[in-house]
Image: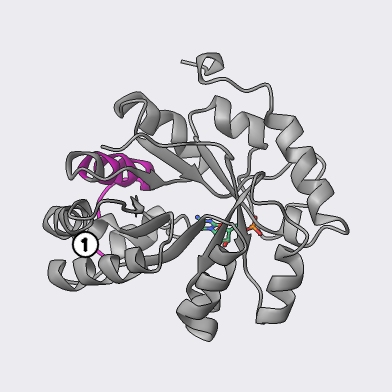
């Protein structure tokens, strides 16, 4: 497992329909204060060239494409992402242990590799949705089981909701990275997020890194918003975590 530099802990989600609006926002941010997340929408529209443009501006990129396929195909996709020079990538833990191990093993052949984390259960799925696709138990039961499988498969961490972070943290070692969206500064609008936590609450509850979109990207002054969230979490030390 490689040593993970958790600073800066904020990952700004770039969810824009166009390259120009995204780059206009990025020009106002500072790579010393945040990383950037590129997801399926922007990657499908703009492709690898957009990721390379962001990287050339000095940002570390989380390429959020949530791979899920047979082991060989996912391993090859991870290798292609690594060739782009991104900092972190992800896949679905429900692709199974062999898929996760194949991806991790392919990446480990490189001198430098992106971090590899897993999505466990999408937070959009309810217990009834899970029953319908044949997963018994609550979403949290499933998250914990799949988090354990991701850990066992040698992944660097998982994406999870801040509500799940403390339960996962109790099971996983401290170097297992928990990346949480669904975070809202105390002063911000909820948008379509429901069960949110503030950035500091999320870190104290066990999260390591925070994916934050609209509270920064839709703010009148995105850099000021980023700086104010940084200030909110500046005093956090892992030792302060509730146990
Ligand atoms: O604007 P907002 O802060 O809600 O953006 C959060 C980002 O995290 C979006 O890119 C969203 O797709 C992603 N995400 C999420 N909830 C999850 C998984 C991912 O909000 N459970």
State the colouring used for the structure image.
Answer: one colour
Most common secondary structure along the magenta stretch: helix
Q: Is residue 55 above or below residue 145?
A: below
Residue at (51% x, 14% y) in the render: 239
In percent of width and height, residue 70 lies at 15, 71
Disc 1 CB within 8 Å of nearest ligand 1 atom: no
Count of labels shown?
1
Residue 137 included in the magenta stretch of the image: yes
Left-right relation of 63 to 232? left
Which residues make up the magenta segment?
Answer: 133-149
Residue 12, image quadrant: bottom right
Quadrant location of ligand 1? bottom right
In percent of width and height, residue 113 lies at 31, 53
Work out whether residue 109 or residue 150 is closer to the camera in this orientation and state it. Answer: 109
In percent of width and height, residue 90 lies at 36, 58
Left-right relation of 230 to 170? right
Residue at (18% x, 39% y) in the render: 152
Few, some or many C-alpha atoms within 10 Å of disc 1 (few <14, some 14-19, many ≥20)? some
Residue 133, image quadrant: bottom left
In percent of width and height, residue 171 lies at 30, 27
Residue 188 included in the magenta stretch of the image: no
Quadrant placement of the N terminus:
top left
Residue at the extreme bottom of the image, as rendered = 45
Residue at (17% x, 45% y) in the render: 153
Residue at (17% x, 57% y) in the render: 96
Task: Please name the residue that numbered disc 1 is placed on.
Answer: 95
Q: Secondary structure at mark 1?
A: helix
Left-right relation of 216 to 85? right
């Amino acid at each position: 497992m490689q040593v993970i530099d958790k600073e800066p802990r904020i990952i700004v989600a770039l969810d824009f329909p166009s390259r120009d609006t995204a780059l206009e926002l990025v020009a106002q941010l500072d790579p010393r204060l945040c990383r950037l997340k590129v997801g399926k929408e922007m990657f499908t529209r703009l492709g690898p060239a957009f990721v390379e443009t962001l990287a050339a501006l000095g940002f570390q990129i989380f390429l959020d494409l949530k791979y899920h396929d047979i082991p060989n195909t996912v391993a090859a996709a991870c290798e292609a992402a690594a060739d782009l020079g991104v900092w972190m990538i992800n896949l679905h833990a429900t692709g199974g242990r062999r898929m996760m191990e194949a991806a991790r093993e392919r990446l480990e052949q490189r001198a430098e590799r992106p971090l590899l984390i897993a999505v466990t259960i999408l937070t959009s799925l309810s217990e009834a949705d899970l029953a319908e696709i044949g997963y018994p138990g609550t979403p949290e039961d499933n998250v914990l089981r799949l988090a354990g499988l991701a850990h066992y498969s040698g992944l660097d961490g998982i994406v999870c909701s801040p509500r799940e972070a403390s339960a996962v943290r109790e099971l996983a070692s401290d170097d297992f990275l928990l990346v949480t969206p669904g975070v809202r500064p105390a002063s911000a609008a909820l948008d379509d997020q429901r069960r949110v936590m503030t950035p500091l609450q999320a870190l104290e509850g066990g999260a390591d890194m925070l994916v934050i979109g609209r509270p920064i990207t839709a703010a009148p002054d995105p850099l000021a918003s980023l700086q104010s969230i940084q200030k909110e979490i500046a005093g956090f030390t892992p030792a302060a975590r509730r146990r």
